[in-house]
Image: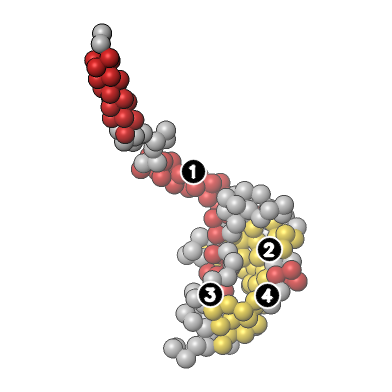
Amino acid sequence: MNSHMLRKLVYILLFSVLIVSCKSPEARRPLQSHTGSFIKESAERNKKIYDEEKVFIEKIIAQDSTNDYISSESGFWYYYNKRDTTTTEMPDLGDVVKFTYNIKDLNGSVILSEKENGLQHYKIDQSNQDLISGVREGIKLMKEGETVTFLFPSYKAFGYYGIEEKLGTNIPVQSTITLHSIEQSNEN
């Protein structure tokens, strides 16, 4: 083989290597597809958790003969510690409310005290506070000066995340809220 052919062969090999290395990488399939089946399984698991918690909460309610519980349309239960029957005014969108609250487990052990939480200023459905959905929804059922105890299933409370070093995953809680004031917004 003469040097001319050898050189040609080297060029062809180099050119081939360049073409192969420049080929774009092929898209790989994900190892796990998050299709509708994943979402469906998750929804079924959440429903099962809620159903179990509901049975547990309803047992607690059945054993409590001192309080009259009300079932909310939002999927939690509550009773009045202090009720005001003279006024009909409840907080509305944009109203600023001042309230205090605690978080306890269903056995009554304090997880977050009223003192730890402090006096809350919350603009109904407009503040971006770290309030669990149960507290945000519960306040809307209250009147100024009332104190109400709510029993929240975990999905209305701290859900899957819990509270670091204080509350585990998927645990229902109770919260006693006192609504100190309602300051109506100008929009209402």
Position in image of residue 77 (x %, y %): 57, 63
Looking at the image, is mark 3 or mark 2 earlier in the sequence? 2
How far is mark 3 from mark 2, CA to CA? 20 Å
Looking at the image, is mark 3 or mark 4 earlier in the sequence? 4
User: Is residue 99 toward the left or the right of residue 1 in the image?
Assistant: right
Q: Secondary structure at mark 4?
A: strand
What label sits on residue 127 in the rendered view?
Answer: 3
Q: Amino acid at mark 1?
A: Arg
Residue, disc 1: 45
Q: Residue at x 54, y 46 (%)?
A: 49
Residues tagged 3 and 1 counted as in contact (Cβ below 8 A): no
Residues tagged 1 and 2 counted as in contact (Cβ below 8 A): no
Q: Is residue 38 visible?
A: yes
Residue, disc 4: 100
Q: Amino acid at mark 3?
A: Ser
Q: Residue at x 49, y 76 (%)?
A: 126
How far is mark 3 from mark 1, CA to CA? 31 Å
How far is mark 2 from mark 4, CA to CA? 11 Å
User: Is residue 75 toward the left or the right of residue 62 in the image?
Assistant: left
